[in-house]
Amino acid sequence: MKTLPFKKTFVLYALGLASCATASSALAQEDRARDASMEQARTEAQERMREEVQTRERDRESDDRDGVRDRDMARERTRDEDQVRERDRASDDDYRTRDREMDRERHETQERIGDEAQARARDRIYGSQLMTEEEREHYRQRMRAATSEEERQKIRSEHHAQMVERARERGVTLPDEPPQRPGMSDDGRGGGHRMGMGGGAGPGGGMGGGMGGGGGGRGR
């Protein structure tokens, strides 16, 4: 077997080492490229996951805002409806209050008119315009205290004569008979149709008598 020279052997050995180094470097580059590709893939996957999470968060926040807005709108509608009902109820209360006030005023007016009419009826005393309040009250008390129609008629006759004399003294003219309201007596109390002895001053100063209705007859 022929032995190669040392120099050639060394060259071949160096070439072999260079080839191994080149192959190793290529493998290392491939590994680095593969690792970089895998790292990029992981990074992209993480970015996609992060974007998906952010998208879900935004959607949930949007849903929450929509829910809050819907709840706010529902509360506003309820508040508006309550305000409308409250205004209607207040309006009804105002109407009822006004009706009560009007009824009360009508009742008070009727009572006042009745009191005034009763006061006028009580003042329907013959010659009352010539009497003082004390005299009118004294006359009414005498009429109320009378126990019979005859006694009341006697009081009327005496009173009539007194008023005629007083009118003559003062130069005024009185009707022959006091204008009494039907159903009212000159003592201020209500009464029905009465039969009584009529008495009055006839022409020439003569005193006449007769049966009369309503407590007084006109003599002739």
Image: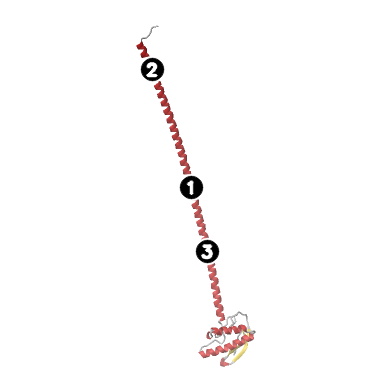
Q: Quadrant of the C terminus?
A: bottom right
- Quickly name the residue at label 3: 95
Say left or right for 64 vs 218. left
Nearer the camera: disc 1 or disc 2: 2
Badge 3: residue crowd in 10 Å (few <14, some 14–19, many ≥20): few
Measured from the top left, where is residue 21 in percent x and y? Answer: 39, 20
Whole-number angstrom distance, CA of label 1 to CA of label 2? 75 Å
Query: What element does badge 3 sit on?
Result: helix
Residue ranking furthest to the right? 148
Q: Could you tell which of marks 1 and 2 lies nearer the N-terminus? A: 2
Label 3 near label 1: C-beta < 8 Å? no
Q: Between disc 3 and disc 2, whose residue precedes? A: 2
**What residue do we see at 46% from left, 38% from top?**
53
- The residue under label 2 is which amino acid type? Leu
Where is residue 25, by image quadrant?
top left
Graded by Cα atoms within 10 Å as few (under 14), some (14 to 19) or many (20 or more), the crowding at tag 2 reads few
Q: Amino acid at mark 1?
A: Val
* Mark closest to the chain's N terminus, 1 or 3: 1
Q: Which residue is mark 2?
A: 17
